[in-house]
Image (cartoon, helix red, strand yellow):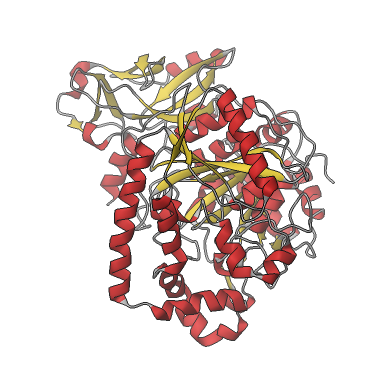
Amino acid sequence: MAKQCGWTISEWLQAYQNGLVPQDALKQLLAELSADDPVFIHIVTPAELASQLAYLEALPEAKQLPLYGVPCVVKDNIDVAGLPTTAACPAFSYIAAQDAHCVALLRAAGAIVLAKTNLDQFATGLVGTRSPYGAVPNSFNPAYISGGSSSGSSVSVARGLVPFSLGTDTAGSGRVPAGFNNLVGLKPTRGRFSTRGVVPACRSLDCISIFALSIDDAETVAGVMESFDASDGYSRVAPPSAKLIGAKPRLGIPASLPWFGDSQAEAAWQASLAQVRELGAELLELDFTPMQQLAELLYGGPWVAERYAAIADFMDANGEQMNPVVRGILANAKKFDATDTYRAEYRRADLAREIQTLVGSVDALLVPTAPRMPTTAQVEQDPVTVNSQLGTWTNFVNLADCSALALPAGFRSDGLPFGITLIGAAWQDSALAEFGRHWQVFAPWKAGATDRTLPAPVDTKAAPAGHVRLAVVGAHLSGMPLNTQLTERHARFVESTFSADNYRLYALPNTTPPKPGLIRSAEGAAIAVELWDVPVELFGSFVALVPAPLGIGTLTLQDGREVKGFICEGAAVEGATDITHLGGWRAYIASRAE
């Protein structure tokens, strides 16, 4: 195994700074991937790797990119240009003409795709066994399932082959495999990441998810992929403010939990609750009946027809070439008509409102990622029932428009990993991640199924020694035209957050590239910002690039912290367009593109 086994993103980047060459490291890593491994459906060829490396080195300031030369793998229902997309169905296979939007963003940030990974066919399943390319075994014990449908993506990270991977999540596919393989599983708010270029499962519910070894790695990848995509009808722009989780969070837990005979999972849950209390959290038992009722709608209601709609023509012509369990599930679509669909949607809306009210009564919900951990043999004996049980605490989340973060939570007495999941309202992603950092410090875990100790999470509350924390609000945001002025100075992205609610934002006239002006005002609002840590010795050269009427001053954040940030001369906003109501510069740019 390559010496890079179990490296995090930061460790890959540090190695490159110390002289490691991407061509050498990635060729060695590629040579160790086997086509016989059920984790993979397609491994890139040496020529395909060389093409990606040439693209990487041609990027401006390539070595300063946040994912420079970092290897990853992608679930095989997500397009990667020039590679086959099969959705784990050989008869469905096609060569992708272009990258999925998120893959394009990752490659532009320096990432290298090494393989397309196995999955439950057409992303239908939470088990990781419904694939003609083979069942993907658990990374700790091959007698147990890996979880699905993002089976190959999770196990490739858990085994330390790559530091992160992309999965998808409609009913829990980005969370259950994380819990079963000792990983972080980031399930974003729907629309935070574009799903353009993804073979749909339920397009109205689908999310691209992230598997990573650590919170920092998951957040780094999320920061690259978060982008409004005007070509994706389900893409959304984050609102101007989001609730924060305090130092003593109030977490809602289910008042009663089914364990389906898995006493070791129950014991691990109780141990996790004890640790969460030690961390300072208050646990409140809530009635999760609305969640359970909504979860039942996903496969017991007409949303199965949405899965069928995604591949109807293919299935009608090639149904015999599909996995029989998947085919049987999708065949249930014919039981529902348009009237059933509207009735179910009304029921979904009512239940979602109840759930959102419950979520709003606490800082977040806390649930077991899965209520049991079955063996492959148990799944084979009763594939539909076991799969349904695994979705107990995941199926309702996208239907209710919630965000979620799966976290490692120690091990059961049989040596298998156990996971917990935080669930928040839409756009609570950053708040969940901040709790995840505290959890990682308090209850640290190893790097997946390796024995490697993870680096401590970055403290997002204060800049590290030798750095200045800077809030950017406009053209210096990640992905914007002037962001390279930060990356070429080795600045590190920290988090997306908001200013205090006493600022107004203006689009300044006659600026190239377009820039905003931020003004403190008694009649203001919270404005979306990004925080970056800039090395002190390079901060002066950055400030020298800031043109009048802009300048660098002190900015107050939503949580009361004060950091350096962009400010604007008051006279400059005369004749400027007040865009405060949009909540941030990204939303303004997106509104111009529509």
Q: In this view of the protein, which residue sits in the foreground, 208 or 24?
A: 208
Q: Quadrant of residue 93?
A: bottom right
Residue 148, position in %: x, y?
Answer: 62, 59
User: Is there any visible trace of residue 60 in the rendered image?
Assistant: no
Q: In this view of the protein, which residue sits in the foreground, 387 or 220?
A: 387
Q: How many marks?
A: 0
Q: Give the side of residue 102 with respect to residue 270, left or right.
A: left
Q: In the current view of this chain or complex, which residue is farthest to the right?
A: 1
In the image, is residue 64 above or below residue 203?
above
Determine the residue positioned at 42% across, 74% down.
309
Q: Quadrant of residue 477?
A: top left
Residue 531, position in %: x, y?
Answer: 45, 25
Determine the residue positioned at 40% across, 33% down.
362
In the image, is residue 95 above or below residue 63?
below
User: Is there any visible trace of residue 440 in the rendered image?
Assistant: yes
Q: Give the side of residue 481 with respect to residue 417, left or right.
A: left
In the image, is residue 548 above or below residue 46?
above
Determine the residue positioned at 19% across, 17% down.
522
Residue 573, position in %: x, y?
Answer: 19, 24
Q: Give the side of residue 568 with respect to residue 206, left or right.
A: left
Residue 242, position in %: x, y?
Answer: 36, 33
In the image, is residue 356 above or below residue 441?
below
Q: In the current view of this chain or complex, which residue is farthest to the left?
A: 575
Q: Give the side of residue 66 with respect to residue 567, left or right.
A: right
